[in-house]
Structure formats: C-alpha cells, structure tokens
Amino acid sequence: MSGGLIVARAAQVQVVQGPFWREQAENQHHTSVEIAAVRGSVLDRSGVELAISGETFDVSVAPRELRDVEAVTRLLVETLGLDEQVVRAATASSKPWRLLPEAHPPSVREVLEDVPGVYLEREHRRFYPQGGLARGLLGTVRGGEASGGIEQAYDHVLQGVMGQAVLATGPTGKSIPGESVVVERPREGGQVVLTLDVDVQEIGRRVLTEAIQETGARGGELVMTDPGTGDVLAMVSIQGESTNVLSAINTPYEPGSTLKPLTVAGLLQNGLASLEDVFDTESGSWTVEGRTIEDVNSEHGPMTLARALQISSSVGVAKAAQVMSPAVQYENLRDFGLGALTGIGLPGESRGKLRLPEDWSGQSPASLAIGYEISTTPLQMSMAYGVLANGGMLMKPRLVKEIRDSNGKVTDQFPPRTVRRVVSPDVAREVTDALVGVVEDGTGTRAQLGALKVAGKSGTSRAYSDSAYQAGKYFASFVGFFPAEDPQLVVMVKLDHPQGSFYGGSVAAPVTRATMEAVLAARNAPIDRWVFVARAQDLTVPPTKANGGELPLVVRFAEVRLGENPGATPMRGSNASVLSESALLGDLSPADLRPEDRTMARVPDVVGLPVRTAARRLHEAGLRVELDGSGVVRKMVPEAGSMVIPGDTVRVASADESEDD
C-alpha cells in the first residue's frame, strides 16, 4: 500500500461499479458508509461570501510505512506547526495508525501528499469570512448539524446530497486507507443568496455598538429595510456581549409611542378623524377607566391630531382613538402585521402579542392606541412603517433573494411579495407628512438630516417582565424613513435600558441619523442616489467635467458628518462629480450646480429585468424613469443603446401592460 494517499471521509475519490461493491459490503471486512457533501455557501445580495465550507485536511501517519522516521518527523513539525514531542510520539508509535491533532489548511497537501506513510484526509469545515457579522442571522453548523438562522432554515438547500462508499476495514474494525471506494459521489449543496448587504450590515453593527457603549444600554437592535420591496438590508441584534442572537425577530417588547402613527393611520383610513381635528389634552393628564395617562411634554390644552402626534401627546392620541370600536382598532393593528408572524422564514420568530378584543379591559383601547398592552418585534415595526413609506402596502420581509446550484445557476427566485393593502396612498402620505413634522418640530428633531426630509417617530416604553413593569428600565426606540418624498430606507433602532437619558427622541433618534449618514456615505449601498440629490435641491444634475462625463452624479459624503461642517469639504471620487456637502444642506444655489458642459449618456438594456431592478439600472446611468405596470420589462423608449442627455426620461413598459398602451 503506497503512502501519501488523499482520501475523502472514509473514501478515496474513485468511482467504481456500484452493485459489485454493495455486495462486497456484506462481507465482514467491508462496510457501506455515507460521504458528507460539501455544504453550500451563503452570499449577500452582491455575492459577498457570508458562510462557506472550506477545505481542510486531517493528517495521519502509519509508522510502519515511514522510510525515514526522523526526516518525516521534522517535515511534519515544520509543515503543520505542531509540537515536536506530539509528532514524534506518533511517528515512533508501535501502533499501526496515528491521527495527528488539528485540522490543517490545503497548503499541506502539496508538501505531504507524496510522503510514504503519511495520509491526508480531506474535510470541509464551516467558515464565516465576515467574522461575527450577522452571525445570529446566519446561524451555525456544528458536527454537521445546522442550528438557527439561515443555516437551519435552508439546511435542505445547503447540505447537498450524501454520497456512498464501501469502506474496507481491518481485523480491529478500523478503516484501511487506500482500500475504500466511492459507490456514489456526494452532490455539493446549493447557494443561498440573501437580500442582506454586507456594507449596510456593517454600518448597522458599528453604529449600534457605539450607541450601546455611549448610552450604557444593555443591548439593542437595528433593522434596515427597503420599503418598496420588503428587502431586509441589515438586521443587527446585540444582547450583552453577544452578537450571536436574533432578538430583532424573537424578543418582543411594548413599542410605546412608535405605535401612535399606526393608530392615527387607522383613524384616517376609517374616516373617523382627520389630522386637523382638535382634541383637548387638558393639563397633560387624563384618566380613563381607572388608568391615568400622562404627557411628558410641556405643551397642553387643545391641539390638532397632527400636533398631538408631533409632540407625542399620549392624551391626545388616546382620546382620538376612543371613536374606534375594539373590532376596528384590532383589525387595524393586525392589518399592519402586528400580532402575526412576518413570514421572514427564520426559526424562532415571535408573533408578538395582540389579544383578541374579547380579552380587552376597559383600559385597553386607550393603552393600545399609545403602544401598550401589545408587544411587537423590531422587524414587525420596521415592516409596519414600510406601509406608510411605500404608499399603504404591507410587504412580506424578503431575506432570501434566490437559490443557486453549486455551479451558480439560479434555480429558484423569491420576488417581492405584497401581503395586503393597509391604507390608501392618500392616508399614507398624510401620516408621512405628519411624521416629517415630528422630525422637524417635534420629539424627533435629533433625527434631522439637513435638507433631506426624514419621517419618523420616537418611542419610550417601560420594560415589562414577571407580570410587572420594571422600575428604571426602559426601551428607547425610533423608527424613521427617508427621504420622506420618495422613501428608500426604513431604519428601526431600539436600545434596551439606556442609562441616564432614556427617551427615544434623545438617544435612539441620533442613532437613526448616524445610520442614515453612514448609508449615504457608503459607495455601494443599495439606494438610489439620484433620489437624494433631486430631493435635496429639486434639481437634475447631469455629469460634469469633474468625472469626464462618464458617470452620473453619486452623492458621497466626506469624513465630516453631514451638517457638522457644511460647505467645507468638496468631495471627489471615481464615482462622484464634484459636490460639496452644502449641496445637500441647502447652501448652494441652482447656479452653483449647473454643469459647464452637457455630455451624452447611453441608455442601458433593461428588457427582461424586473421593473424595480430596471429602474435602478437606469437611475445609475443618470436617467429618469417612467414606469408603466409592474413585473418584467417588455419594452423601453428610447431603445437600449440610444444616446440621450443625462437626466432625460426613459419610459419602461412591463409585461403586464396592454399592447395598445
């Protein structure tokens, strides 16, 4: 038997006639065994590897086959980096077979595979190239068993198909290297492509970690979603010292005032109130069914419902909600997705808690209106605010974009899915405008982002456990989306038990702002940058000499944070025209942004692409888009390849549009 043989787990890579070896397995010296398949990879939306199976080698020696024990011992010590005494004990052993410790990288194969008496056994172990990033969401694999997250939810895709081998054994029952054969090769697992963006996830991790450290919070969550598609771009959960948790979907809490916009939306949708209706908040204290509701702000007395939402008057919103029947109030909250699983498809998701109306007390309608007697998860709140941001539709959160086989061929796709219409576009716009007021002149001013309008709401709720509220323990949260006129991103931030100031508007709103700033500054973040430029100045800014007219304007922020030093730092980059931060802060006049030359742009080919993907491609090329229908693009005007002036409009017609349109 020659040395230097590389075997798979219990099998040499050699395919022989299956029936013969299955028969041989019945002999006492042969055993039929399974060969583990290489586990498939998990990738982010751009193909960045999040979880992979890397090749390693176990190294064994057969002392009796070694031709030069001393030389082989030195080679093993040098190549494997093991302690010399450990290696020498193996090479000098009287036993026929010794396994050396540790798994070793593929580089050892080149050195050791032809050494007589040294055997390499190939293994595939799970690695996470991004370190601890999104580990709670990804899950783990130990001993071939998937646990939690994507690893568990898509184990049937990732694990592949086992192979089979006939293993030759000696008198003691141990396998004989080189005498085993493969009956059926294992088939490598498929690839799971997520909607997650590794850069955005890292932004969320960094910003949340800093916020927890600065506020002394016990932990928290940060979720970023695309309101138009339901795509989960980032999901960060930190509890204590651990990031290997998924509290964003499995640990509900009372949302407090962040639920008030949903109450207001329900009132408007059912024609029970308008934002101009006036409610008397009295002295900031109101007792209903034995429960006293108090406002913490100093503005009291009669005020419109819009103003009550802006300053987070619990008295005002609770009074307004009294006209809702329990059935209507319950249905409104359920329509927003509360009290139900989101359908994200990860193990351990909590549906939160929303009791049926027959289980309510007399205090329940007022309590529910302001975010108490209900528990939600951060993901549920992010998706609920997505309803307001996208014009009234509840989207199913999309975490998995597509499945590919081991060769990278797409075998299954998961397009965005609408769950239901919750409110009309008009109601969604009205509530969004009110939430802009919250940020501009209410409890969310610390979420302001210069000239870009942010819509959002802060929340502060007491921690509830063991059937009682915990003294001095609060959840501070803020949910916002931007730009308010054409929302690209929903950001949900929650901090658990911050020390010192614990109000959502004080500690969570700045985290939302910092997150938005960082996403804007990220070169490859999955956002439409033309929207931000247009909304900041209401201008179309074509390419200029600064970038040779080759690329559209892409907003890039310098090291200085938005608003800290407006106008001071010009920004240049391979993907950016010259534009200072003051362009977004409103300090430049339209004349400052006029290009010296107009250059031409080539219309990219988007026929056959999903409408939203096509729109993004066209925006990236510096073109405006007019969409007709939804689905897959069937026709575009002007046609692909046409030369147009940057900023011109391309009309995109989808497959569901009639031929006469």
Image (cartoon, rainbow, N blue to C red):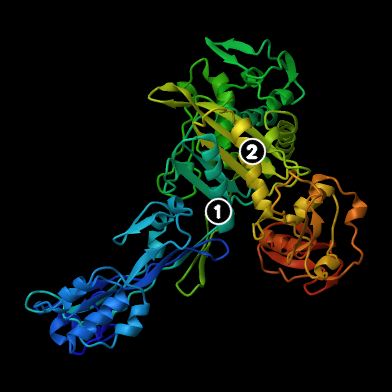
Tag 1, which secondary structure? helix
| Amino acid of disc 2 | Pro
Please give the residue where the numbered disc 2 appears in the rendered image: 510
Q: Position of residue 588 (x, y in %)?
A: 87, 49
Q: Position of residue 540 (x, y in %)?
A: 85, 56
Asked if residue 541 lies left or right of residue 48, the reply is right
Asked if residue 172 lies left or right of residue 445, the reply is left
Q: Earlier in the sequence, mark 2 or mark 1?
A: 1
| Amino acid of disc 1 | Glu
Asked if residue 28 lies left or right of residue 445, the reply is left
Please give the residue where the numbered disc 1 appears in the rendered image: 202
* Residue 392 appears in the rendering: no
Residue found 75% across the figure and 67% down from its top = 635
**Which quadrant holds the C terminus?**
bottom right
Q: Classify residue 586 by image quadrant.
A: top right
Give the mark count.
2
Classify 10 Å Cα crowding around label 2: few (below 14), some (14-19), many (20 and above).
many
Tag 2, which secondary structure? helix
- Residue lying farthest left? 171
Q: Position of residue 281 (x, y in %)?
A: 68, 14
Q: Classify residue 145 by image quadrant.
A: bottom left
Instruction: Tell whether label 1 touches label 2 (CB within 8 Å).
Output: no
Q: Position of residue 114 (x, y in %)?
A: 28, 88
Name the one closer to the observer, 172 or 361. Answer: 172
**Which quadrant holds the N terminus?**
bottom left
Name the one closer to the observer, 509 or 346. Answer: 509
Q: Is residue 101 above or below residue 69?
A: above
Q: Classify residue 108 by image quadrant.
A: bottom left
* Residue 3 appears in the rendering: yes
